[in-house]
Amino acid sequence: MVIAAAKTPGAEARLPFLEQVKSFERPFWAANVMEIIERLAYYGVRVVIPIYIASTEDPAGLHFTNVQKGTILTIWAFIQTLLPMFTGGFADRYGRKPTIAISIAVKIAGYLLMATQRSFGGFLFACATLAAGTAVFKPGVQGTLAVGTNRRNSSVGWGIFYQLVNVGGFLGPPLAGYLHHLAWKWVFFACAAIVSLNFLTLLTYDDKPASAKPDDANAPQDKAPRELTHGTPWEVLAYSMKRLFRPRLLSFVLIMSGFYVMFMQLYDMLPNFIEEWTDSRDIVTTLGLHEGQLAQMTPRGLQVPQEWMINLDAGSIILLMLVVAYFGARMRRLVAMFIGIFISCVGLLLCGVTMSGWTCLLGILLFAIGEMTAVPKLNEYLGVIAPKGEEALYMGYANIPFAVGWTSADYLGGIAYDRLADKANLALAYMREHGLSAPGETIERTQAMTRLMAATHTDARAATVLLWNTYHPQTVWYPFVGVGILTAFAMVAYARIARRWTYENA
């Protein structure tokens, strides 16, 4: 293989694992705590929000279409992932702690608006507010991480960060799943309260200034430019834009954008797919589950809630992240990203290729392994190559692949799911095509499955199988997996070129 694993330059100076852990100072650990708290609230909302927006089976939901859901999530993604390109520069210029404090206040406002807005425009504004707060938060926290790591401990440092991020990601969905059965508003009120705890965490450390990284002999040692350290806000903005268009940086972020086209479908399309198509009775039977938090009664019988199934992703990362980071430290960063992207492709395909609950769980597990192999390396790679004084700026650039991938994936994913896999739409199509509804008759999407079952004399389970065999909704996954595979092989080409760059061949 053209990008076979090899020793990273400078690997001979890498510290033993425990010494690396001990080398991290208080700002590093404070940043991790803040990220846990923020992710606990954020993922509590993100995993259930597709159901709240578009489910036809939840009587208290918003009952928007999947196209409307795609529009909301696309604008959310656009704001949350492109704004850090600018807010990262401001965090370097004006301080990471002040920008984090501002972001916390904005995020609280976003959650409170989500609890109270039910119109399309009002809820879209609420999501945009939350997205803006998250966009300000991430570069400040990740910049603190980048300043607190160096080439000798960066792999383990980012591995710890990604593992602890998923502690919050693991706890959030079941909390939201419990609260939304009480009332949806309590999900958003609780998240606002949780994220406010980060005001207290800010008081526990001093912001470590950007400084040279003595361990990084080959690192770029550019002096931090006046535009970034002393410039006006417009100079900071102009400099942030200019630095992005460095060819090596730009090509890397564009390649990784393809990965995020695939990656975000786990959070934005799979929740709806599991709720509508995956039959997890095999899991319920094998594990002997009874009705409660881990199994809930649905029209198709006792099923595992989608938030618990997807939570296997975060749970696997909590258990395995440090192991993966330990072995990943012995591979070039670009090699690890290629391997991770390819494994994630296989995992996502398995998530939706059958109706089997166990097959879906196996796919989620493989996706998690690929994710924890590739995603921390993206942040690590950009953190290691960031010039002195530009750590938060480069962490802002790390959001650009997320931006391009997430925005395009949600827009295209909303359209694709609406046409290929939306169960209510397929039920309506089946009745039209088989003369089971009157010509010109308007049937509400929320009543589509009830009408189909009555017309075909089937129960919910048999009607779902009928639609699966007729319309093959699993095909909705194929284009996104294809994009992921193309991204993996684009990384092969990038890694070959990277061999010419002494410092970036990492």
Image (cartoon, rainbow, N blue to C red):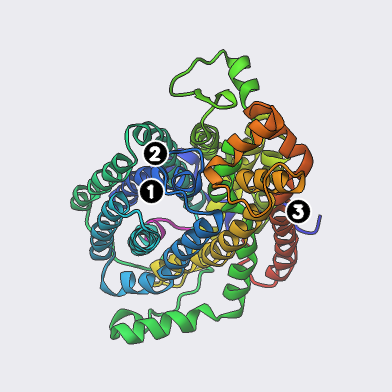
Label 3: which residue?
Answer: 4
Magenta stretch encompasses residue 416: no
Q: Quadrant of the C terminus?
A: bottom right
N-term-proximal mark, 2 vs 1: 1
Q: Nearer the viewer, residue 47 or 506?
A: 47
Answer with the quarter of the image where residue 276 lies: top right
Label 1: which residue?
Answer: 42
Q: Nearer the viewer, residue 160 or 111?
A: 111
Q: Amino acid at mark 2?
A: Gly
Q: Residues within 10 Å of mark 1 (few under 14, many from 20)?
A: many
Magenta stretch encompasses residue 148: yes
Residues marked 3 and 1 touching at CB (< 8 Å) = no
Q: Is residue 489 visible?
A: yes
Q: Residues within 10 Å of mark 3 (few under 14, many from 20)?
A: few
N-term-proximal mark, 3 vs 1: 3
Q: Secondary structure at mark 3?
A: loop
Task: Give residue 19's position: percent from left, percent from top.
Answer: 43, 42
Q: Residue furthest top?
A: 288
Q: Secondary structure at mark 1?
A: helix
Is 321 placed left or right of 440 in the picture? left
Distance Cα–Cα, label 3 vs label 1: 37 Å
Task: Give residue 166's position: percent from left, percent from top.
Answer: 45, 41
Q: In the picture shown, does residue 213 fall above or below 349?
A: below
Which residue: 63% across, 49% down? 425
Q: Amino acid at mark 1?
A: Tyr
Q: Nearer the viewer, residue 276 or 448?
A: 448
Q: Which residues are magenta?
A: 145-150
Distance Cα–Cα, label 2 vs label 1: 7 Å
Q: Quadrant of the N terminus?
A: bottom right
Label 2: which residue?
Answer: 172
Which residue: 35% across, 68% down? 211
N-term-proximal mark, 3 vs 2: 3
